[in-house]
Image (cartoon, rainbow, N blue to C red):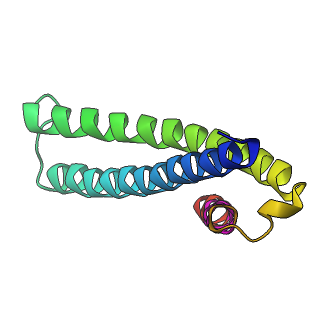
Amino acid sequence: MSEIQAIQRQLKIKAGAAKRLIKEHILYRKEAGDQQRKVAKLIAEGVPDDEWDLKNAKKVLDESERMIHDSATRMAKAAGDLGDLIIAAKQRPELAEVPELLNAETVLKEGKEFETDSL
C-alpha cells in the first residue's frame, strides 16, 4: 500500500470515528435530558427519596452525565487527531481533492460546530 493510500485510509477511519463519537455524544445528551425529566416527574409526584424508582432514575441520570463528559473528551481527542491528519494530508498536493479529505474536513467542521453549541 502506498503512502497516499495509507493516508486516504486513515482519513476515512478517523473521520468515521469522529462522526460516530459526535452521534454518541448527542445520544447521551438526549438520554440525560430524558432522565432529568423522569427524575423531576417522580419528585413532583412526591415519590420518597428512598424508593427504588427514584434511586434508579437518579443513578441512570448520573451515569448519563458521566458519559456526556467521557464522550466529549473522546470526541475532542478524535477531532484533534483528525485535524492533525488533515493538516498533514494538505501538505500533499496529490491529496488536495480526494473525497476522503473533503469528507474529513466536513466531519471536523461539524465536530467544531457541535463543540461550540454544546458549551
Residue at 31% in and 41% down: 61
Q: Quadrant of the N terminus?
A: top right
Q: Residue at x 85, y 58 (%)?
A: 90
Q: Main secondary structure of the magenta part?
A: helix
Find out whether residue 101 is within the magenta segment.
no
Residue farthest to the top, as pictured:
50
Q: Residue at x 57, y 52 (%)?
A: 12
5 relative position to 45: left or right: right
Confirm whether the magenta stretch covers residue 105.
Answer: yes
Rendered view: 65 above or below 50: below
Residue 71 coordinates in the image, percent (x, y)? 50, 41
Residue 100, located in which quarter of the rendered image?
bottom right
Residue 92 rendering spot, x and y as whole percentages: 87, 55
Horizontal side of 102 relative to 48 (left or right) equals right
Residue placed most toward the observer, 6 or 59? 6
Q: Which residues fall within the magenta stretch?
A: 102-112
Q: Position of residue 29 (x, y in %)?
A: 41, 54
Residue 47 appears at what percent x and percent y?
10, 43
Q: Quadrant of residue 45?
A: bottom left
> Exactly how many numbered labels are in the figure?
0
Query: Can residue 36 be seen by looking at this rendering?
Result: yes
Q: Is residue 79 visible?
A: no
Q: Is residue 101 above or below residue 9?
A: below
Question: As drawn, is 31 to the left or to the right of 110?
Answer: left
Report the front residue among 40 and 69: 69
Q: Residue furthest front?
A: 1
The C terminus lies in which quarter of the figure? bottom right
Residues 20 and 10: in front is 10
| Residue shown at 51% from the left, 35% from the top | 70
